[in-house]
Image (cartoon, grey):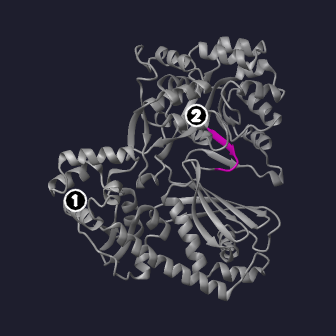
């Protein structure tokens, strides 16, 4: 993947194409929806060897031919197979000071930094051709295939094996390699979850990256028992229990990263399914500004977290980033003069200066009992991981009434629906009105990959489709009233953005995630309506009349600003 401007310069400098020919070729590639570099190679306008050798000279990097080179197994495995496949980068040699890598993508700084920290060696980058990378990838397959064959001969173990046999199997080198590779690659790819799913004839491994599941590997069925046993040993779970669900944790700590894995094992028809949630422990704490709140919403949140008592609620579906928002607010409030205590399930991030407790429902330590105990610990600020039932809601609201600032989460689709949700929990309306300060609803949207971003205008067909989903004219008016749109701008004239797809983003067009928000401040007028038992629609109308920006509006602004796409905003708000 050569930067397009650099590619044009390379073609001109080496007199491979003229400016006119470049322009014509780019237009042909665009019409076919192809990347310029890909089109040049497909049409044989330039040979891969000549292109990458010329590119190496342009970047002042060495070019390496790997097609007839046999690479030592220990060097090859420094870059795991799935990482090499995804990033078209392989390690081919090393000495006491340097690790020599060959790549098609010299812009992948993140991977080179990762390898440097992992090996404690200086990374010496070489450029090679796609054909040579493919040849090296075959060397991985030879190694793993041979080991899988040996496993099939040596062991047809299944989950009903004796624990001691499973323990031995879990320590087999191929099994250790498979599990280590899966974990390392998940960390590198910033996956939030790993799914290991058995079927009748094979085992599928999927990662959730930026909120979307992707297939990354298919393993032979005979590896399943060993992989599950290895994960059970790491998580201190029972090897001989195959009929009941099990939950555990383990941690990987290196010089490069420190990650906790929350493990859930569930018996299924074809064997035990494993899901692991990755929780990076050295997560850089976000500030309120970095969350992605619009200026107006940020001011509302800041104003309300400075109040000495009341409730701050964050709502949204599972995996919408609610806990991250609460931790960010806690970080802003964390000062020596206040006592902050939390009751969570589970504790996702450790925070210095804060007392954190994890519930244990099996022994009766629930959110409600934990919250009662916390109130005897002289807290100023309390965070309750989630309000799930009437008992927890009542204690939390009473705590907010008696001089504590209470932070918590609920599962509702938007900010306003939190009010009827509390009423369903049998909480009196006067208590809701007098204790709730602010409700923040949120979703996570994928960000456009900055490496392959392009702009476009909406065509008539897309505009017609959007008008069927929401009122575009009303959206235009609201955004111009908030100052986010010029009065003269129409939906047809606004530039939107998308990612074409490239190697950096695994051809998805997205990399990373950001929140979109809806912030409801419970002021005098809204309080009065809650006491008078106004309907959800009446509350929503009043909130928007008073200037509350909806999730859809916030997403629309972020799409207009080139942060995300309209499709992504609709995906998370219209579910």
Quarter assignment of residue 168: bottom right
Residue 424, can we see it? yes
Q: Quadrant of the C terminus?
A: top right
Separation (CA) of disc 2 from disc 1: 41 Å
In-image side of 198 versus 117 (left or right): right
Q: Is residue 345 left or right of residue 474?
A: right
Does the magenta segment cover residue 573?
A: no
Circle on res. 122: none
Does residue 335 show up?
A: no
Chain-order first, disc 2 or disc 1: 1
Disc 2 designates what residue?
570
Q: Residues within 10 Å of mark 2 (few under 14, many from 20)?
A: some
* Magenta stretch encompasses residue 340: yes
User: Residue 177: x and y, percent?
Assistant: 55, 75
Picture coordinates of residue 120 (x, y %)?
37, 69
> Do the residues bearing badges 2 and 1 touch, measured as CB atoms within 8 Å?
no
Instruction: Give x and y (percent) for residue 224.
Output: 68, 73
**Where are the magenta residues, as a range?**
339-347
Q: Position of residue 121 (x, y in %)?
A: 34, 70
Of discs 2 and 1, which sits in the foreground? Answer: 2
Residue topped by disc 1: 59
Q: Pointer 1: residues within 10 angstroms few (<14), some, or many (20+)?
A: few
């Amino acid at each position: 993947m050569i930067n397009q401007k650099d590619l044009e310069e390379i073609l001109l400098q080496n007199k491979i194409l003229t400016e006119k020919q470049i322009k014509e070729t780019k237009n042909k590639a665009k019409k076919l929806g192809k990347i310029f570099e890909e089109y040049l190679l497909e049409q044989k306008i330039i040979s891969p060897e000549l292109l990458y050798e010329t590119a190496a000279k342009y970047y002042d990097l060495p070019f390496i031919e790997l097609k007839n080179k046999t690479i030592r197994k220990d060097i090859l495995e420094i870059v795991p197979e799935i990482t090499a496949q995804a990033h078209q980068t392989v390690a081919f040699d090393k000495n006491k000071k340097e690790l020599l890598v060959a790549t098609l993508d010299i812009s992948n700084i993140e991977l080179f930094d990762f390898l440097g920290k992992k090996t404690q060696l200086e990374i010496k980058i070489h450029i090679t051709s796609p054909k040579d990378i493919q040849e090296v990838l075959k060397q991985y397959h030879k190694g793993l295939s041979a080991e899988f064959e040996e496993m099939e001969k040596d062991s047809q173990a299944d989950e009903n094996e004796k624990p001691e046999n499973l323990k031995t199997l879990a320590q087999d080198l191929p099994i250790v390699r498979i599990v280590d590779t899966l974990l390392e690659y998940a960390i590198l790819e910033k996956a939030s979850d790993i799914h290991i799913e058995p079927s009748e004839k094979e085992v599928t491994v999927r990662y959730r990256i930026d909120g979307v599941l992707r297939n990354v590997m298919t393993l032979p069925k005979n590896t399943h028992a060993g992989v599950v046993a290895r994960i059970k040993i790491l998580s201190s779970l029972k090897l001989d229990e195959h009929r009941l669900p099990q939950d555990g944790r383990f941690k990987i700590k290196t010089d490069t990263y420190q990650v906790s894995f929350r493990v859930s094992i569930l018996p299924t028809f074809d064997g035990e399914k494993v899901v692991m949630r990755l929780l990076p422990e050295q997560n850089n704490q976000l500030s309120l500004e970095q969350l992605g709140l619009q200026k107006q919403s940020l001011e509302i949140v800041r104003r309300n977290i400075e109040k000495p008592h009341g409730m701050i609620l964050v709502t949204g579906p599972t995996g919408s980033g609610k806990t991250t928002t609460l931790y960010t607010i806690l970080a802003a409030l964390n000062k020596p003069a206040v006592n902050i205590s939390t009751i969570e399930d589970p504790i996702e991030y450790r925070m210095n200066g804060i007392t954190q407790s994890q519930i244990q429902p099996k022994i009766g330590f629930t959110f409600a009992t934990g919250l009662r105990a916390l109130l005897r610990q002289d807290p100023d600020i309390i965070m309750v991981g989630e309000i799930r039932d009437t008992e927890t809601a009542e204690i939390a609201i009473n705590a907010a009434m008696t001089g504590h600032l209470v932070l918590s989460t609920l599962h509702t689709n938007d900010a306003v629906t939190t009010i009827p949700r509390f009423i369903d929990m049998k909480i009196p309306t006067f208590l809701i009105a007098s204790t709730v300060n602010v409700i923040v609803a949120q979703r996570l949207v994928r960000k456009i990959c900055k490496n392959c971003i392009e702009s476009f205008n909406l065509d008539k067909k897309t505009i017609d489709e959007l008008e069927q989903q929401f009122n575009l004219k009303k959206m235009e008016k609201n955004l111009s009233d908030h100052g986010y749109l010029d009065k003269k701008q129409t939906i047809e004239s606004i530039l939107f953005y998308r990612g074409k797809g490239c190697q950096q983003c695994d051809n998805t067009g997205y990399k990373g995630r950001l929140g979109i928000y809806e912030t409801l401040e419970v002021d005098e007028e809204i309080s009065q309506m809650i006491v008078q038992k106004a309907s959800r629609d009446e509350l929503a109308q009043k909130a928007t009349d008073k200037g509350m920006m909806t999730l859809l509006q916030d997403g629309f602004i972020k799409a207009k600003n080139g942060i995300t796409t309209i499709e992504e905003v609709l995906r998370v708000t219209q579910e």
